[in-house]
Amino acid sequence: MMTEQAAPHEGDPVRMFVTLGRWCARRPKRVVTAWLLLLAGLVAAVGVFGSATTETVSIPGSDSQAAHDAARAFADSASGRQPLVLHTPAGGPLLTSDRAREAVERTARALAARDHVVAVTTPYEPAGGAALAADGHTAYLAVELDLAGRDITAAVVRDLMAAAEPAEAAGIEVTPGGNLAEAADKKSTRRSEVIGLVAAFAVLYLGFRKPIAAAVPLATAVVGLGISLEVIGLAGHVTDMPSSGATIAAMIGLGVGIDYSLFCLTRFRELLATGKPVEEAAALTTGASGKAVAFAGTAVIAALAGLALGGLPLLRALALAPGIAVLVAMAATLTLLPALLALLGRRLAPVPGAPSAAPGAADGPRALPVRGWARIARHVADRPWRYLLAGLAFFVLPALAASQLSFGQLDGGDKSPGTAGRTAYDRLASAFGPGVNGPLQVTGTLPTAASGPADPAVTAMGRALKDTSGVAAVSPAQLSRDGRTVRWQVTPTTAPGDPRTAALVDRLRADTLPAVTKDTGREAHVGGVPATQLDLNDRLARRLPAVIGIVLAIAGLLLLLAFRSPVVAAKAAVLNLLSVAAAYGVLTALFQWGWGAAPLGLGGPVPIPGYVPLLMFAVLFGLSMDYEVFLLSAVREAWLASGDNRGAVITGLARTGRIITSAALIMVCVFLGYLLWDDPVVKMFGIGLATAVALDATVVRGLLVPTTMVLLGKANWWLPRRLDRLLPQMHIEGGEEDLARTPSTPEPVRNT
């Protein structure tokens, strides 16, 4: 029998984290300098190479991807034809007037002389004849660049707009469209981040009662966020990174960065209050709370990694961005934070007489005052069935709304009024019809080379396209150099995001093109943005159950490893689904049904892209795991110490309730700060994440988790013997008394 617990050996995770924390605490200036140099180096790299994003979507194996691949037979510019929309008001000069024509042609020559411009087509030449509206007040210049969409920056757009000065001097309004509008409308997230930081500082100050203590989590999170955004910007040069990816990463990175530092700083202050030396307190903090942070961060990253199994580059990119942010936030908490704790030392200690942000785990159950979360915990534990049913009832209406969630397609008409993208969209739609903003690209491949555009094989396909219901116009056929590939630009009668446009795509694929290519050896595919978005949503709908299953399995396995309880792991996975369902229900009501359109600055109902619920599921499941880890760590620690399940639940909730709700409040403030963003997708993530986190930290953690654990009793900790032998000992929980056995220098292990 062992009369004295053995000291952790070199490979013990506790020892590893304590050693890391002690190393950083002993070299604080060196560690802080290294982080700041890394940030400065990445900022310089982005200054040289730029931050690249693109809205290009590739869907391997889809019909739209086949159309895109076939179109490589044409010598298109890297950017394609990007519109600069020309417009004069109803009482203004016509674009067909001599003065306007001269100004537009001067503008075209000035544009052609700019860097990166390879061609400019005016509406006055045969190739651009379709670019002049019948009323003479709207037209567009087609600008081709040697830059891919991801490399078009705001600086490039400003340079092009400067070249448009002759047109503007003649009273012609010039607005960038397409990828040019996306670059022009791209804004800094700084305002939203400042709002989140100010709100977080207020919450932290109320908890810690010291400005310097409130500033430490913010400083750690800001440094981590800065590094994350620069890395994501550089990653856009090697992979397609949507602009919303960096914004979502900023949301998640700032939120978890503050929360992780908050958990660790709370433990550090508790240790200082017990008289621990500063360096030792920083090391022990990393060994306890830092270890839980590492596990929680790994859980978030693992949930995001499950999206990679969706088989879509877009999902991989959208998972990569927040994954980078969480990884950097975790690294900053484990290394930069202990260095800051050592530098500031006892200036971070609690104000005498002030309440701590959370009761200390090291204090033991007898030290817990019967107030606040301790009182709530006992009240809930005494009435488990009542609060279980009340908590579940809270989710009924959001779940019913979530059942009506459907995937849709956003287009320029869903952008905020006043943006370049919305202005260009509205002017083109008004002058040329809504379909001009989302033309389809129909590409055909021929078994033998066509003799020219008048070849019967080509004209037959063209006629079939024109005769299809829902088609407003079909461009002249364009042949590749070898005559084996032909394509048409098909303009629908409806807007890109209109369900009738999706129906047209299906009609072309199922009826029109098969009828004209059957038994001919010819193939035809439908591409373009509307077709690509339709294929994306179809693929996401098919992959959604598998991705959800994979994320659930990963989460359950991680919780099983952490707490060695199949019941706890399964229960946590099921309860986490409730907050996700609530977020989906709120999205459905506010966006899809349009109940929150006016307050959110939207013109009406907005369709929800398929990738939003999928990415939100992974992110929310990961964030829910954070709070689950911190709560259950305290519960299991109390259970191991006392063997009293009900008392352990009360103790765990009392110890962690205040800090979890404070952390959730900070994260909600950060997420809601992004409602100021013009992009509807960013608003969706802000609302959805804020809703889920708020409900998860209150209803789920405060009611459902404790009531189910009280009702399950000792079954919470049941573990089959065979599984017990297979599972590694991870010990996510652990109090100060356990860490105190991890010395600064090795000592022999004593057994008796």
Image (tube, rainbow, N blue to C red):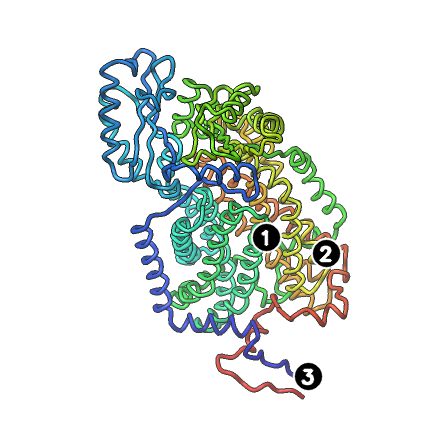
Mark 1, residue position: 306
- Taking 639 as reference, is 54 left or right? left
- Tell me the residue that label 2 is attached to: 709
Q: Is residue 51 visible?
A: yes
- Give the distance between the C-alpha atoms of the residues marked 1 and 3, in whole angstroms: 42 Å
Which comes before the other along the chain, label 3 or label 2? 3
Tags 2 and 1 in contact by the CB under 8 Å rule? no
Q: Residue at x 68, y 69 (%)?
A: 727
Residue type at mark 3 is: Met
In percent of width and height, residue 109 lies at 23, 29
Say if 258 sits above or below 691 in the image.
below
> Observer-nearest residue: 220 or 469?
469
Quadrant location, the C terminus: bottom right
Residue 139 pos. (x, y %): 35, 21
| Residue that appears at 76% across and 70% down | 721
In terms of sequence position, does the residue under pointer 1 or pointer 3 come before the other? 3
Residue topped by disc 3: 2
The secondary element bearing badge 2 is classed as helix
Q: Secondary structure at mark 3?
A: loop
* Residue 24 x %, y %: 42, 70
Could you tell me how far apart the alpha carbons at marks 3 and 2 are, in whole angstroms? 32 Å
Q: Tell me if label 3 and label 2 are in contact, CB under 8 Å.
A: no
Structural crowding at the residue carrying mark 3, measured as other residues with C-alpha within 10 Å and reported as few (<14), some (14–19) or many (≥20): few
Callout 2 crowding tier (Cα within 10 Å): few <14, some 14–19, many ≥20: many
| Amino acid type, mark 2 | Met
